[in-house]
Amino acid sequence: MTDHSEPKIIMYGLSPKVCDTIKKARRWLEQNNVEYRFHDYRADGIDADLMQKFIAELGWEALLNTRGTTWRKLDESVRASINNADSAAALMVEMPAIIKRPLLWAPGKPMLLGFNENQYQTYFIEV
């Protein structure tokens, strides 16, 4: 019997129209026949509970993209106020473009943040 359920791997990020890293990561998954579901933070949203799961596993510092345009455009006082998991989580839920991407979540595996071909190769050898 064939399992026609939804792919168990989820890629979180922003539309490939606005994020080249997502575009590269999705291309890699498709070229390597890895089934996944894409969750667009802007279109599909992100809630505080899901953000807490991400933070619990990866840490808020890793998730918060302080190198991107969204962070740089924030007022200095706002940036200075992001100094713990709660303040970072609130900001990332409010402004999902500030979350580092992509984030991959596969059952039974640690979450994987960012895109690197070698990391993906290693991550999916067992999937």
Image (spheres, rainbow, N blue to C red):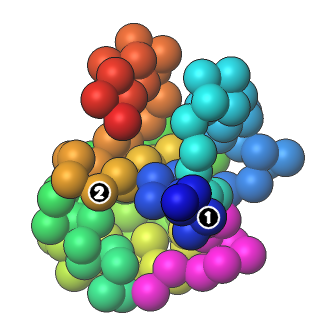
Q: What percent of the width, then of the height, locates residue 8?
A: 45, 59
Q: How many marks?
A: 2
Q: Quadrant of residue 82?
A: bottom left
Residue at the spot 37% in from the left edge and 42% down from the top edge: 113
Q: CA distance from mark 2 to mark 1?
A: 17 Å
- 88 left or right of 26 in image: left
Residue on which the image places disc 2: 107
The kind of residue tagged 1 is His
* Residue tagged 1: 4
Q: Residue at x 46, y 53 (%)?
A: 9
Of 39 and 67, which appears nearest the observer? 39
Which region shows up in magenta?
39-47
Check residue 88 for magenta coloring.
no
Quadrant location of the C terminus? top left
Q: Position of residue 104 (x, y in %)?
A: 42, 48
**Amino acid carrying mark 2 in the image:** Pro
Vertical arrangement, residue 16 with respect to residue 97, above or below: above
Q: Helix, strand, or loop for circle 1?
A: loop
